Amino acid sequence: MRARRLTGSLAWLVVLTLTAAGCGLSGGSDDGGATAGGCKVDEGNVGSGKLTGDVKGKITFQTTNLKKDFGDFFNGVIKDFEKANPGASVKWIDDPGDSTFTQRTVADAQGCTMPDVINVDSPTATALTKAGYLLDVGVKDPEAAEPFVPAFWKSSTMKDSEGKSVHSVLPWYTGGILLTYNTDMLKKAGIDPAKPPKTIFGLFADYEKIAKTAKGKYYATMANPIWRIPADWDQMDIKTLSADGKSAVFADDPRTVQYVAWMAKLYKAGAMPKDSLSSSNDPSTPYSQGQVAYGSTNPSFVRFVKQNSPSVYAKTGVGQQPFDALGHTTGAPQYISVAATSKHAPTALAFAKFLTNAENQTAWCKDPNVVIFPTTTTSLDDPFFQNATGSDPFSQARKLVAEQLKTTTAYQTNLSPAVQKAIVSQVQLAMQGKKSPEQAVKDAQEKADDLLKQAG
């Protein structure tokens, strides 16, 4: 149940992609000045060549809904940076992160007033990079990659206006992916909790075993495929979109029909509550109430269960999310980006690197009020993550995810809400027996293609 973690951040992706259609990066304009996304900028901010300049001047740093809970931490980071760089000052602003966040970010970018250093997710970074509003840190600082997990850095790229992959972001913090399950329910179905399946279809087979044992008294998982598509397909290495992102291609893979057939079979067999097919509820509450065998794949969910249902927590186990054909997990990190429009780009880049360095990432991820994981190699090697003691689920989850993140990638398929809904709706029809899996997949691809063409 992973796909839902993407949808909130995708809410305005289509709007962003269309409205942020700037002029890309340019070494010059009609009057001879350099531009980024249509805004006049310092020539050093664009084109090839390492960014140089003194670390001085006032910059603005924007986060999303972090000041209330982590004000002391970030104020401390800012104070340390300013102490190390006496000529620089950082103004911290905290966006509420509501449904208009992306619209306001786009408006700031188009008005050439975007914050110098800004926390962005993958969809927002993708669109801002394409429009030319973000600094290419991979070019402007060739050493920027050094602290980060190599696989994370390699996959943390966005396409520019010419379709070239560029490092316009620094990986910051991320969640993790794992299986959480009620060990008692698994054992009753003849499933060994210590041997999680290695494929998505293997997991589905376990769902079926639970349905046969539970006989409607409880269920394996929730039904709505919006939680799983396209995340499951990414893990299976099924290509949802073409390389340029302009067309849907998932119907070309025969495993997609097999996947939908499995979902229909499980729904009919009673592995999922019938009334959860169109429900937006995640499995947190029903799992905590002993109604489903498998919980959320988010590591923080384990803490939720511990706090809200100690009796279920005592039966909770954690295991590896199936790697399937992809061979490793995928992360959905938050990023730190630097505006190509910054008037003090050297200062902004220096602060972005300072914020995301191993020392500061480790310190924040150890905060007891947050359940996140760092993206630097040194941080993940810290005893806090590696030397988990005891057999409690939360300690084991922390260690498991930290080990996964050493080989993870940030690759994820970004779908607009409309395209995802078009695909999910067809799968739901197949699950209800109103269409064959073959027809549902065919229709889903056609509908997704139409929407992608309309978006350009």
Image (cartoon, grey):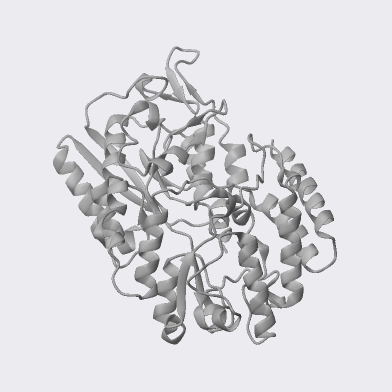
Q: Foreground residue, 89 or 284?
A: 284
Residue 13 percent location from the top left of the image: 59, 46
Q: Quadrant of the N terminus?
A: bottom right
Residue 41: quadrant of the picture: top left
> In this rendering, would 351 be left or right of 312?
left
Image location of residue 367, percent across then percent down:
28, 63
Quarter where residue 438 is shown: bottom right
Total count of labels: 0
Vertically, is 403 above or below 136?
A: below
Res 221 → quadrant = bottom right
Q: Position of residue 267 (x, y in %)?
A: 73, 72
Question: In terms of depth relative to the viewer, which is nearer, 105 or 398?
Answer: 398
Residue 417 horizontal/vertical position (percent): 64, 53
Residue 371 visible in image? no
Q: Residue at x 72, y 77 (%)?
A: 274
Q: Looking at the picture, does residue 1 appear above or below residue 406?
A: below
Tell me what residue is drawn at x 61 percent, y 48 percent.
Answer: 237
Q: Residue at x 79, y 63 (%)?
A: 430
- 424 over 311 or under it: above or below: above
Which residue occupies 58% across, 54% down?
Answer: 324
Of residues 118 and 59, which is closer to you in this image? 118
Residue 293 left/right relative to 392: right
For the question of whether residue 145 can be seen, the reply is: yes
Q: Is residue 88 left or right of residue 130?
A: left
Front residue of 433 and 407: 407
Which quadrant of the rendered structure holds the C terminus? top right
Q: Is residue 167 left or right of residue 59?
A: right
